[in-house]
Image (tube, rainbow, N blue to C red):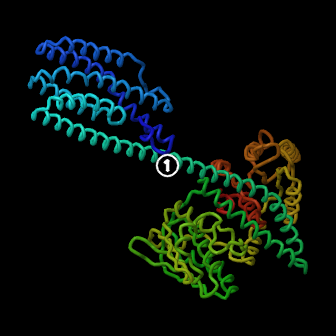
């Protein structure tokens, strides 16, 4: 194959040339044996008519050439692509040799002026050229090497006779040769282009696969980084929250209590940011299972209105949450989180005007819409707003606008619940989010759980469960600061708290308490203990009690873990779990639930 036949890209050219060589060698054996048999039969027919001894030498020469072609080493699929040019040149030389030997026979037949033999010769050569055009056009050098010598031999032998008939036959042969070569070149070009397109598509698919794999690796690394960073941040924050809660409780009726309240607001804000990251990990881990039920939207809208009305008033915005009397079929907790994130996002990006939340019935569906008069979203940004940490017009990462995870959580919840989220926006005019929910029949009484809406309500709830708190609690945690903070908080609520650093210490404390007749009412256990000890396994072993005859001890797991695999394991264990940093109210409520004779399942404490 000539160098001009190779594509510009050398690697791609080698692959294309290899396919061309493979196509030609695919019929190598059959073609060689068929040609040898045909030469013998055709030669015998011609010799029987003309009795020219030179024909016998020609037949012998062609048979020897065919034997050489048959037995010489040939290309196989095991040959490397870099050798394709060598095998292309080799087969081109062999077919050219056969054609040059064949080119002699017209000069042995045409001078006899035997029209039937001349016609038979032309038919044979034309047929050979046609066959070559079909089998050799993948390699232009082989096509030209086979067709040109024998065709030119025939044309020149005919033209040498100089009479009208032979000149006409020579012209017809020349025209046929040109048409055959043109068709062969065209077929070669089409095949080459199709092979190049195929290999380019394969290369693009391979690169796309590599990019997808790299993206997946980056996503996994990001998840691992977030999990590790979140866990490492939660540990000291958890201790700060416990110390702060104990301090706030001690200074409640003193002037210094205001500073403690400010400290806890800052701690809770930081904890909320980490909880948002945890929500992403939990959703990606598939550890959240929705529980669909009829939900009264008005009962859902009321706590949302209470939650965001103060912020809207602070920004001098109008917040309209319109009652509808409609019911939908959804998970109330997860739907509350979806709409809460949408309202939070709307208030963040609205400086004038306001935010409207409404519900409308459309056939078998209900549209819950959150509209704002904010900055809007440009069309080129609309495809990215659901990405983690992406925020419109916030290059400086203004902390007041959050982390940029809220809409990412909305999208994940949308997929989990099967509630499509639609978005329409006009820059400078505002944004309109729509959540499409299945409608449900009205029930006798609202089925939506209540949410604390302010500090006063949370404090009132804390007073109601205070008499239900356990008397004695054993804490297993490997960090000294957390043990001190936790025992300080629990003792400020009149709970006898005992803290240990490892499973052996916990087992000894349980045994001692059992011997004294003062068993522990509750076991608090950190998930990730020192030296890689699994707190879940340790807690399950310890909760069985110190020995025969001892009662099983309720277990509450506390963790800052965000790894999807570990979160899934916690969920499968069915052990109640709280995530660091744990708010004092949530901790006390969970302890009261577990210490009560008939525990009441609270989503904030037991839903992993």
Q: Is residue 137 above or below residue 272?
A: above
Percent of width and height locating residue 522:
78, 54
| 14 left or right, relative to 375 | left
Q: Identify which residue is drawn at 88% across, 69% down.
A: 247
351 and 164: which is toward the camera? 164
- Quadrant housing residue 134: top left
For the C terminus, the quadrant is bottom right
- State the residue position of label 1: 204
Q: Identify which residue is drawn at 49% across, 47% down.
A: 205
Q: Is residue 164 visible?
A: yes
Percent of width and height locating residue 33:
28, 18
199 and 546: which is toward the camera? 199
311 and 208: which is toward the camera? 208
Percent of width and height locating residue 29:
33, 21
Q: Residues within 10 Å of mark 1 (few under 14, many from 20)?
A: few
- Quadrant housing residue 480: bottom right
| 435 left or right, relative to 401 | left
For the N terminus, the quadrant is top left
Q: Identify which residue is drawn at 80% across, 57% down.
A: 235
| 66 left or right, relative to 593 | left
What secondary structure is found at the residue carrying circle 1? helix
Percent of width and height locating residue 418:
49, 62
Q: Is residue 551 visible?
A: no
């Amino acid at each position: 194959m000539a160098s001009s036949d190779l594509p510009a890209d050398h690697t791609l050219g080698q692959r294309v040339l290899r396919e061309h060589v493979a196509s030609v060698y695919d019929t190598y054996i059959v073609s060689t044996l068929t040609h040898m048999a045909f030469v013998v039969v055709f030669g015998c027919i011609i010799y029987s008519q003309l009795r020219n001894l030179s024909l016998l030498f020609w037949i012998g020469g062609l048979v020897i050439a065919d034997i050489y072609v048959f037995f010489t080493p040939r290309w196989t699929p095991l040959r490397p692509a870099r050798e394709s040019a060598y095998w292309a040149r080799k087969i081109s030389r062999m077919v050219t040799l056969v054609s040059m030997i064949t080119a002699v026979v017209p000069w042995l037949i045409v001078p006899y002026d035997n029209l039937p033999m001349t016609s038979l010769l032309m038919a044979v050569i034309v047929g050979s050229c046609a066959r070559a055009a079909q089998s050799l056009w993948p390699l232009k050098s082989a096509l030209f090497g086979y067709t040109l010598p024998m065709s030119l031999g025939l044309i020149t032998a005919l033209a040498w006779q100089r009479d009208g008939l032979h000149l006409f036959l020579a012209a017809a042969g020349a025209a046929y040769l040109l048409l055959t070569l043109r068709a062969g070149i065209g077929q070669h070009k089409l095949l080459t282009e199709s092979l190049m397109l195929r290999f380019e598509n394969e290369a693009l698919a391979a690169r796309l696969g590599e990019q997808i794999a790299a993206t997946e690796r980056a996503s996994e690394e990001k998840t691992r980084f977030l999990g590790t960073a979140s866990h490492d941040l939660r540990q000291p924050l958890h201790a700060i929250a416990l110390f702060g809660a104990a301090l706030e409780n001690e200074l409640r009726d003193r002037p210094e209590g205001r500073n403690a309240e400010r400290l806890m607001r800052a701690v809770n804000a930081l904890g909320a940011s980490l909880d948002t990251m945890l929500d992403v990990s939990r959703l990606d881990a598939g550890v959240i299972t929705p529980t669909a039920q009829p939900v009264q939207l008005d009962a859902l809208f009321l706590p949302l209105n209470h939650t965001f009305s103060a912020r809207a008033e602070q920004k001098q915005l109008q917040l309209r949450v319109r009652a509808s009397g409609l019911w939908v079929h959804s998970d109330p907790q997860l739907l509350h989180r979806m709409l809460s994130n949408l309202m939070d996002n709307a208030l963040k990006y609205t400086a004038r005007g306001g935010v409207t939340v409404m519900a409308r019935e459309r056939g078998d569906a209900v549209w819950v819409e959150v509209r704002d008069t904010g900055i809007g979203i440009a069309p080129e940004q609309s495809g990215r707003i659901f990405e983690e940490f992406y925020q419109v017009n916030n290059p400086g990462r203004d902390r007041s606008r959050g982390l940029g995870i809220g809409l990412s959580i909305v999208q994940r919840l949308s997929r989990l619940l099967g509630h499509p989220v639609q978005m329409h926006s006009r820059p400078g005019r505002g944004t309109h989010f729509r959540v499409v929910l299945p409608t449900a029949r009205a029930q006798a009484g609202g089925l939506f759980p209540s949410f604390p809406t302010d500090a006063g309500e949370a404090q009132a709830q804390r007073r109601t469960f205070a008499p239900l708190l356990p008397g004695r609690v054993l804490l297993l945690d490997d960090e000294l600061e957390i043990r001190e903070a936790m025992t300080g908080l629990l003792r400020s609520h009149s709970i006898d708290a005992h803290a240990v650093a490892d499973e052996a210490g916990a087992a000894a404390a349980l045994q001692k308490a059992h011997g004294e007749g003062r068993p522990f009412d509750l076991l608090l256990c950190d998930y990730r203990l020192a030296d890689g000890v699994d707190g879940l396994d340790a807690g399950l072993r310890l909760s069985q009690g110190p020995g025969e005859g001892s009662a099983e001890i309720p277990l509450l797991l506390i963790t800052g873990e965000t790894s999807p695999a570990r979160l899934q394991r916690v969920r499968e264990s069915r052990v109640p779990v709280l995530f660091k940093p744990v708010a004092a109210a949530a901790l006390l409520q969970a302890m009261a639930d577990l210490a009560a004779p008939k525990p009441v399942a609270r989503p904030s404490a037991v839903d992993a």
